[in-house]
Amino acid sequence: MSPTTLSRQLRTARTPDLERRRKVVALSNVGALAGIVVSLYQTGVISHLPDLPGKIWNADKVDASDYAYKRARTPDALMMTVSYGITAWLAGAGGKDRAERLPWLPVALAGKVVGDAFFALKLGKEEWSTNKALCWYCQGATLASLASVPLVLPEAAKGLRRLLGR
């Protein structure tokens, strides 16, 4: 497929799969934005993260804790930003008929999204048990991950059927 055709399809084609993929791109960018904001705090670019009202929210505490820096010797929000970027990339890759032409792409996207949702829930549990507080930016990203799961399954099923020759 030519870049011109891909550009036109991604921007203007209207198919159920493509509409769901656009939603996944949007949700992934919400998650990436949350990661970007938190990473600004975790690297000292900003000195405070505003919180939602309520006693359970304390982004400064959570995002400055050992919990947030114990993986790969880096602030976890930087990894979060990259991860959501990869999800958006997988959602945006390929044309409107990619389940037929590149069936591995929707299957890979589904694997990534389901894995992200599982990992986000696990991290949310760890965040609470370690800090007795939650970061609303991180939990918003978790909701974006969870909302993406049902969006990727229909196209992934088509891709899987294609890969299995059915």
Image: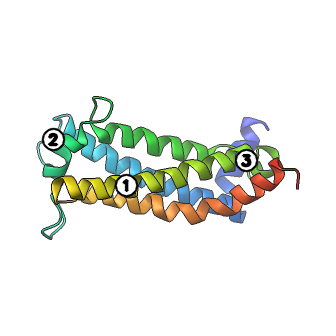
Screen quadrant of the N terminus: top right
Could you tell whether 113 is left or right of 93 in the image? left
Q: Residue 16, located in which quarter of the rendered image?
A: bottom right
| Pointers 2 and 1 in contact (C-beta within 8 Å) | no
Residue type marked 3: Gly
- Disc 2 from disc 3: Cα separation: 39 Å
What residue did someone put label 2 on?
Answer: 46
Could you tell whether 48 is left or right of 29 in the image? left
Image coordinates of residue 113 in percent, x first then y, are 53, 53
Image coordinates of residue 106 in percent, x first then y, are 68, 50
What residue did someone put label 3 on?
Answer: 95
* Image point (47%, 42%), residue name: 85
- Disc 3 from disc 1: Cα separation: 33 Å
Residue type marked 2: Ile
Helix, strand or loop at label 1? It is helix
Helix, strand or loop at label 3? It is loop
How is colour applied across the structure in the image?
rainbow
Task: Say which label, 2 or 1, has the lower sequence index.
Answer: 2
| Pointers 2 and 3 in contact (C-beta within 8 Å) | no
**10 Å crowding of disc 1: few (<14), some (14-19), many (20+):** few
Image coordinates of residue 127 in percent, x first then y, are 25, 54
- Disc 2 from disc 1: Cα separation: 27 Å
* Image point (55%, 47%), residue name: 112
What residue did someone put label 1 on?
Answer: 122
Question: Nearer the viewer's eye, disc 2 or disc 1?
Answer: 1
**10 Å crowding of disc 3: few (<14), some (14-19), many (20+):** many
| Pointers 3 and 1 in contact (C-beta within 8 Å) | no
Asked whether 155 or 157 is in front, the reply is: 157
Helix, strand or loop at label 2? It is loop
Task: Say which label, 2 or 3, has the lower sequence index.
Answer: 2
Question: Nearer the viewer's eye, disc 3 or disc 1?
Answer: 1
